Amino acid sequence: MTLTEKTLEHFFVLIFLAGLAIFLRNRNVIRQQEQGVFARLVTDFALPALIFGSLSVEPFTLDGLLPALSILTSISVVMLVAWVLGRLLKLGKPVLGSVVLVAGVGSSSTLGYAIIQNVYSNDPQVMRKVVTMGEFGVVLPLFTFGVMLAMFFGRDAENNHSFGAAFVRFLRTPVFAATVLGVLFSYIELDRDNWIVNSLYELIGAIGASMTVLVAFAVGLMLRPIEFRKLAPLILLVAGLKLVLEPLLALAAGQAFALDPIERELLIIEAAMPSGTLAAIIAARYGCDSVVASSLVVATYVLSLVALPLVFAFSL
């Protein structure tokens, strides 16, 4: 089975699980308002465990930051293009802010990690590479510069926070703590044959493995009817930038930085992911248009069923 086939196979599993979440929601087993619970379980529970377990296995090296720079470059270019096109379309600031954020930032640290974790059979070296790429190339910029961008475009009268305040908030997140601890523990030679150490990593691995189900359920609970006619131009704009342009830019960046084949594969998979729920949450939190942001995220998830095979066929 090829990498493309394995990736799409797991992607369809996630779609099935999301559909199961909708079924359970309709039967009142889980409720729409519990979407935030599943989102927090992803960002504050499963994701930190996956990050720590991946980074702490082998000593951290600075050369791992080159793929992170590649994906950050791709995201930055896409967001700039989104801003220019949004201005040409004369979008209002709250809508423009949502478009810029969801066009550039994908589900790299949620859906992307879950797919790669399964496609590569949870290979420690692969996971260390992709976590380094995602945390330093996507998550850190999103929780700092992304927050500031949302504040700039948002209509929240209380948006008087500084970049420093946004950065301090990121330093308090479980994601940042897991990243720091993972890097520190990577230099400590723990005896993996020790039953206590081994049991700890088994526990961390089990928590990290829950990411697939939690992400799928969070997406399923997020799905709502979309007014297609009203949002069609924005959907086409964001989908073209996020699902087509960004993977192509990532491919070019990977070649320009002379990344090895596995790093280029991971870079393209991460860049080809649909728009991220975290980007929509940040857009809504700081006064951008939350309806537009969440609708565009859902639309890119649906359209990625067509875009992913095409991108992988031409680039992997």
Image (cartoon, rainbow, N blue to C red):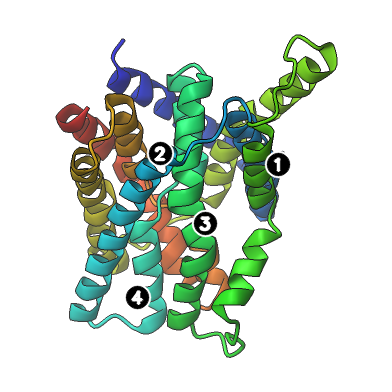
Closer to us: mark 4 or mark 3? Answer: 3
Tag 1 secondary structure = helix
Counting from the top left corner in percent of width and height, residue 309 is at 24, 30
Figure quadrant of the N terminus: top left
Label 1 crowd bin: few (<14), some (14–19), many (20+), radius 10 Å: many
Q: Earlier in the sequence, mark 1 or mark 2?
A: 1
The amino acid beneath tag 3 is Leu
Q: Image height check: is 99 above or below 225?
A: below
Q: Residue 293 location in percent, x, y?
A: 43, 64
Residue at numbered disc 3: 140
Q: Badges 4 and 3: C-beta atoms under 8 Å apart?
A: no
Number of numbered tags placed on the structure image: 4
Q: Amino acid at mark 4?
A: Leu
Image x and y of residue 78, in percent: 26, 60
Q: Say which of 297 and 313 sits in front.
A: 313
Q: CB under 8 Å between callouts 2 and 3?
A: no
Q: Is residue 21 visible?
A: yes
Residue at point 45% right, 52% down?
A: 138
Q: Say what amino acid the circle numbered 2 marks.
A: Asp
